Amino acid sequence: MLSQIALLASPPTNARNFLITDAYGRGTHNARGEAWLQSIVDGLVAFRSQDPPLNLAFVNFATIWDGVLGSDPGYEAFGYTNPGACFIDGNTCDDPEHYFCWFDGHPSKQTHRIMADYVEEVLTHCRV
């Protein structure tokens, strides 16, 4: 990812603005994943220190996954009745608006709304 940002920031494109999203973990974490995530953050910080600096926003969706799939605050705090998938083996649940995923690993419409709201918060309030 960092090499692609460097490529896009170079001539002839000279891109300056980047939104980076990450779905690492999906509710679980390990030392290898945390080290990878830290290397990405370190690389983004380095991009900010170059002249001219890049404008970067990093959205770590682990914040949502951990909140919904973990016990604090848990899926019910987000309005879900189920932290799993609505569409399983060709069958759709009766209440897709209250499921975390549409099918396994793919966020539902409601989850996408929460993700979009989170991206907006990051763009409004956070900087690398």
Image (spheres, rainbow, N blue to C red):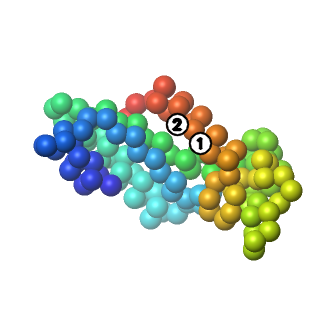
Question: Residue drawn 75% across and 71% down?
Answer: 90
* Percent position of residue 6, x then y: 22, 48
Q: Which mark is residue 115?
A: 1
Residue lying at the far top of the rendered structure: 124
> Mark 2 and mark 1: span between their CA atoms?
6 Å
- Which quadrant of the structure image shows residue 86? bottom right
Q: Horizontal placement of 51 versus 98: left or right?
A: left
Classify mark 1: residues with Cα within 10 Å, few (<14), some (14-19) or many (20+): some
Question: Residue drawn 56% across and 50% down?
Answer: 62
Q: Horizontal placement of 74 versus 1: left or right?
A: right
Residue lying at the far left of the rendered structure: 11
In the image, 30 versus 17, the foreground residue is 17
Q: Which mark is residue 10?
A: none
Task: Mark yes or no: residue 72 visible.
Answer: no
* Percent position of residue 108, x then y: 68, 52
* Percent position of residue 47, x then y: 25, 40
Vertical relation: 24 (above or below) 76? below
Contact between marks 2 and 1 (CB within 8 A): the answer is yes
In the image, 125 versus 116, the foreground residue is 116
The amino acid at mark 2 is Val
Classify mark 2: residues with Cα within 10 Å, few (<14), some (14-19) or many (20+): many
Question: Residue drawn 55% across and 59% down?
Answer: 25
Label 2, on which residue?
119
Question: Residue drawn 68% across and 63% down?
Answer: 103
In the image, 89 versus 119, the foreground residue is 89
Q: How many marks?
A: 2
The amino acid at mark 1 is Met
